[in-house]
Each structure stands twice: as C-alpha cells, then as structure tokens.
Amino acid sequence: MVLGTNSGATVEPQAVVWIGLVEVRPERGNDLLGDALGAYVNVLSKVRGESEYKRFVTDALSANRFRIVAISDAEPLALRREKHAVDKELKALASEVQSVGDVRCGEFFTYASLAHSEQQRRQLHASKHSQQTGSARRRRSSRTSGKKRGIY
C-alpha cells in the first residue's frame, strides 16, 4: 500500500513578482512616447512563471497600444535583487504589484532611431537596468488600465 500520494494532482507554483526589460514601439494613435521610435522599460508583474509573465506583460502593453519588440532578462525580482541593486522606484512598484497584482512599468527610456535602439539596449543590459542610461530620454508613463491587468 502506498500512502501520501496526491492522486496525480500537480501543485501550482505560488505567484511572485517578476521583472523584465521590455522593448516597445508605439502603435498608431499612441502618443505616450512623443516622437520617439521606441523605448525600453522595466516591467513588473505578479505571476507564476516566465510564460505567464510574458503573456500578462504583452496583454497589458498591447491594450495600451504598444507593440512588443522583445522581452529580455525576465526573472523573479527576488533573484534580480540577489545579483543586482534595484532602485527605489522599482522597489516601490514591486510593493504595489505584490499587493494589487497588476502590471506596472518603470520609466520609459526612449530612442529616436534603430541605431540608438541597439546602443540603448547595450547600455541598459550592461548597467543591469540602472537609471543612469546616458543620453536616453526618460518618460514617465501615465496611469492607464490594461485589458486584463492594469499598467502603470
């Protein structure tokens, strides 16, 4: 006799705050980035894993008329904090995400051309999402609501 089995049921992982670097480009009718071609932004969401993170982030940004170019360095915020310093703004957003569960964005670091895009990506990757990004223009997003989840 075998005792203690779960009859094949799986245990769902607990949702935790994840962070990733997302490159976006505005769709027609989206003027949140002004005349910029695109931007990089740290995005946080409370999820159960990478695929759920990507789905929630994509849904929220798409609902706000952004096209996702790439999502990189997606990982639980706790792991990021073990390896790198995380600034106050992202810590505050993480607390909000932890309690509310919506998708939240940090500052948008805009670029004006594809050449600037690649340079910006390298700078952000090298500094591990530091607020010091050289000549990047910063834009704060306004509070809007996403389709399934809010976005800030």
Image: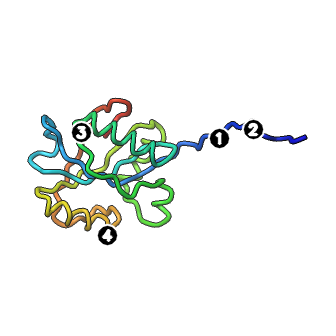
In the image shown, does 56 or 109 lie closer to the viewer?
56
Q: CA distance from mark 1 to mark 4?
A: 37 Å
Which amino acid, mark 2? Answer: Asn
Q: Tell me: 92 left or right of 123.
A: right
Which quarter of the figure is the C terminus placed in?
Answer: top left
Residue 142: give its label: 3
Label of residue 11 in the image: 1
**Looking at the picture, how far across and down is residue 69, in whole percent?**
25, 50
Q: Earlier along the polypeptide chain: callout 3 or callout 2?
A: 2
Q: Residue furthest left?
A: 35
- Left/right placement of residue 79 relative to residue 119 reads right
Tell me the SS state at disc 4.
helix
Marks 2 and 1 close (CB-CB < 8 Å): yes
Alpha-carbon span between mark 4 and mark 2: 45 Å
The residue singled out by tag 4 in the image is 126
User: Disc 3 vs disc 2: which is toward the camera?
Assistant: 2
